[in-house]
């Protein structure tokens, strides 16, 4: 008898999990869930605690609709998937960029890619970066070299120690922490130095700076790239016999002593041997019966996995082709990108500003945000006087995301694919991968989840 797997979530994680499970001989069904799953009354207490954090409204835009997708060279699982699928890029091909940092002057400071220095020791790449003073460069190189050679780890568990504490011990000045290290931390970990997990920061830093030169590469792709990938993968699955169920009503789990017995979706009970949740943690919690939550402490940890939403300001520079750029510390924004069109599209450049700072989002008007983004754009890119704010069609996208900040201690709450319920499995960028929540961790999680299911359910 062919084993059947039911996947909750028609997002990239759910689709990749389904694609991998086909290789294990499973028959696959997917429930196409919306961004927000309606919670049931029995989870009111849990929902009240979750509502103190950001909840997901039905109007929330995903990153695929708003923000250019950034691919790093160390995204090995993602590149392998794209190659396996023979994925065809949208009209704008991936564009190589370097990480740049805003400085006091008109020019940005570039963290160059190490292709010409690949034969040297990785630590020798830092002396060429002018974003740090000579003293800061000497201190961080000396500090890192000792840790790498002695194989020493921080005194505390690295997930508990903050990045800021580590940098202070490396004698990094306040200026270098605020103008270089904090923007880098905000970009990769979605939070400030004082809040961020040192373990994940070192992991990303090691992959991006101290691995082979190709891993340090960074590419921009258009905002529609992720949506296009999901569409093509979804069609491939349908062609292979995968069933996708539309979902527009409340949904809940039916459980018994043996685990999940069925998923109730509208007036239908859908049954399978394996159930995979590719939903956000709070949406999964809303589906589980109260007795399951009370019995297994495993699920209470999911409450402590944070989500935040960003704000995006975009401009379209018509008849202007600026070089592709990714600039960090574009105060008051965390970063912004410039992405020119590619033939045969008409010449224009999409400029996207992103901020994850709640105080900026809540305390300022849309006009203020647009004005500040425009001032930053003029300052850094030296626009022609012919380009005016109004002609570049400014727009604001609120609550773009979600993003998952890598706060100290949250690594202990990121779950493994196998839950205490024997036939329930989890997949998502927020699960226990070795990277911050990202496209790469989504693919890694899907691969790991499918492998666990394929080997545990014979």
Image: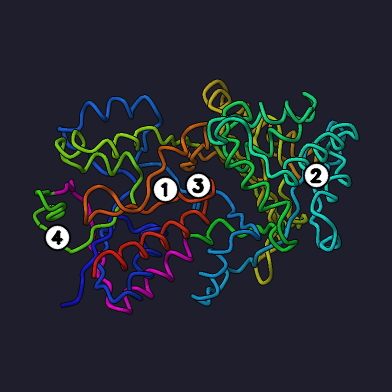
**Count of numbered circles in the view:** 4
Q: Mark 4 or mark 3: which is in front?
A: 3
Furthest residue in direction right, as rendered: 134
As rendered, which of 287 and 222 lies closer to the eye? 287
Asked which quadrant contains residue 16, the reply is bottom left
**Mark 1–mark 2 distance (CA, rounded to whole Å):** 39 Å
As rendered, which of 405 and 372 lies closer to the eye? 405
Give the mark, 4 or 3, whose residue is nearer the N terminus. 4
Label placed on residue 431: 1
**Mark 1–mark 3 distance (CA, rounded to whole Å):** 8 Å
Residue position marked by numbered label 4 in the rendering: 270
**Residue 234 % position (x, y):** 37, 69
Q: Mark 1 or mark 3: which is in front?
A: 1
User: Callout 3: few (<14), some (14-19), or many (20+) C-alpha neighbours within 10 Å?
Assistant: many
Give the mark, 1 or 3, whose residue is nearer the N terminus. 1
Highlighted magenta segment, given as a residue range: 227-253
Give the mark, 1 or 2, whose residue is nearer the N terminus. 2
Q: Residue at x 88, y 44 (%)?
A: 127
């Amino acid at each position: 008898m062919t084993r059947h797997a039911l996947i909750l979530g028609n997002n990239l994680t759910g689709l990749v999990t389904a694609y991998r499970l086909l290789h294990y001989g499973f028959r696959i069904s997917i429930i196409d869930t919306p961004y927000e799953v309606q919670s049931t009354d029995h989870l009111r207490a849990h929902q009240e605690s979750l509502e103190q954090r950001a909840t997901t409204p039905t109007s929330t835009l995903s990153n695929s609709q708003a923000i250019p997708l950034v691919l790093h060279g160390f995204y090995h699982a993602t590149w392998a998937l794209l190659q396996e699928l023979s994925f065809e890029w949208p009209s704008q091909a991936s564009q190589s960029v370097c990480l740049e940092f805003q400085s006091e002057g008109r020019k940005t400071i570039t963290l160059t890619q190490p292709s010409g220095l690949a034969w040297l020791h990785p630590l020798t790449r830092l002396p060429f970066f002018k974003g740090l003073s000579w003293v800061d460069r000497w201190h961080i190189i000396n500090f890192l070299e000792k840790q790498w050679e002695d194989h020493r780890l921080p005194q505390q568990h690295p997930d508990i120690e903050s990045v800021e504490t580590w940098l202070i011990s490396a004698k990094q000045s306040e200026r270098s922490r605020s103008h270089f290290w904090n923007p880098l931390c905000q970009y990769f970990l979605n939070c400030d130095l004082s809040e961020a997990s040192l373990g994940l920061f070192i992991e990303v830093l090691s992959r991006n700076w101290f691995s082979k030169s190709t891993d340090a590469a960074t590419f921009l792709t258009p905002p529609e790239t992720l949506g296009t990938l999901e569409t093509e993968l979804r069609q491939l699955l349908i062609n292979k016999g995968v069933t996708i169920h539309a979902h527009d009503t409340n949904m809940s789990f039916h459980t018994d002593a043996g685990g999940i017995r069925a998923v109730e979706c509208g007036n239908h009970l859908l049954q399978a041997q394996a159930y995979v949740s590719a939903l956000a943690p709070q949406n999964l919690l809303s589906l589980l019966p109260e007795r399951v939550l009370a019995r297994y402490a495993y699920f209470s940890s999911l409450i402590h996995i944070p989500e935040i939403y960003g704000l995006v300001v975009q401009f379209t520079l018509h008849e202007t082709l600026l070089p592709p750029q990714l600039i960090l510390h574009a105060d008051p924004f965390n970063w912004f990108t410039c992405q020119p069109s590619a033939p045969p599209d008409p010449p224009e450049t999409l400029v996207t500003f992103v901020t994850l700072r709640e105080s900026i989002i809540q305390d300022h008007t849309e006009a203020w945000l647009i004005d500040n983004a425009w001032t930053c754009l003029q300052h850094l890119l030296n626009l022609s006087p012919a380009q005016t704010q109004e002609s570049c069609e400014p727009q604001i996208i609120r609550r773009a995301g979600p993003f998952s900040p890598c706060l100290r201690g949250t690594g202990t709450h990121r779950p493994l694919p196998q839950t205490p319920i024997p036939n329930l499995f989890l997949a998502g960028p927020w699960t226990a991968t070795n990277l911050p929540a990202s496209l790469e961790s989504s693919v890694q999680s899907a691969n790991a989840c499918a492998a666990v299911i394929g080997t545990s359910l014979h």
